[in-house]
Amino acid sequence: MRWTVETLNATVDKELDALPTDMRARFVRISELIAAVGLERVGTPYVKHLTGPLWEMRLRSKDGIARALYVTIRDKRVIVVRVFIKKTQKTPRREIDLALQRAKEILE
């Protein structure tokens, strides 16, 4: 069974659509890489563990840096729960908290 990458809901779709074109293309590229070789074989600089069940896809382009925060669930599914443009060195705690809150919907 292959890995799939999905978004949680329409809110996350809108966050993804709000990114510049080249960042969205980077998201698609990393998603395709996960599907092709498996999440367990994709590491930095593409993905990194944040805390608990939360991981991040690292999107870098000429327009800046963005993050797609995700969790994994059974059946080899990656569920993106938050997408945002990163403006500070560290991922803001409020973004992590929001992602964890959204992830509760599918992890419980």
Image: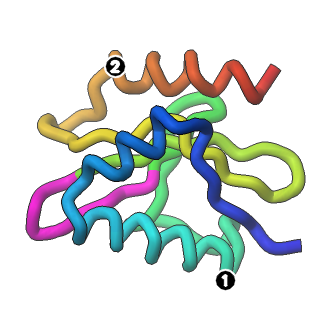
Disc 1 marks which amino acid?
Ala
Residue 62 within the segment the image draws in magenta: yes
Mark 1 lies on residue: 36
Residue 95 within the segment the image draws in magenta: no
First-in-chain label (1 vs 2): 1
Disc 2 marks which amino acid?
Arg
Give the quarter of the figure containing the C terminus.
Answer: top right
Q: In front of the other: label 1 or label 2?
A: 1
Q: Position of residue 105 (x, y in %)?
A: 71, 21
- What residue is at 23 percent from the left and 71 percent from the top? 22
Q: Is residue 83 above or below residue 106?
A: below
Instruction: Please name the predominant secondary structure of the magenta segment in the image.
Output: strand
* Residue 101 circle label: none
Mark 2 lies on residue: 93
- What residue is at 30 percent from the left and 40 percent from the top? 84
Q: Residues within 10 Å of mark 2 (few under 14, many from 20)?
A: few
Segment tinted magenta in the rendering: 57-65
Residue 28 located left or right of residue 80 = left
Q: Position of residue 7 (x, y in %)?
A: 58, 47
Q: Position of residue 12 (x, y in %)?
A: 47, 39
Q: What sort of colour scheme is used for the picture?
A: rainbow
Asked which secondary structure carries label 2, the reply is helix
- What residue is at 65 percent from the left and 33 percent from the top? 53
Residue 102 located left or right of residue 37 = left
Q: Residues within 10 Å of mark 1 (few under 14, many from 20)?
A: some
- What residue is at 81 percent from the left and 73 percent from the top? 2
Front position in the image: 42 or 4: 4
Per the model, the C-alpha gap separating discs 1 and 2 is 32 Å
Residue 27 located left or right of residue 70 = left
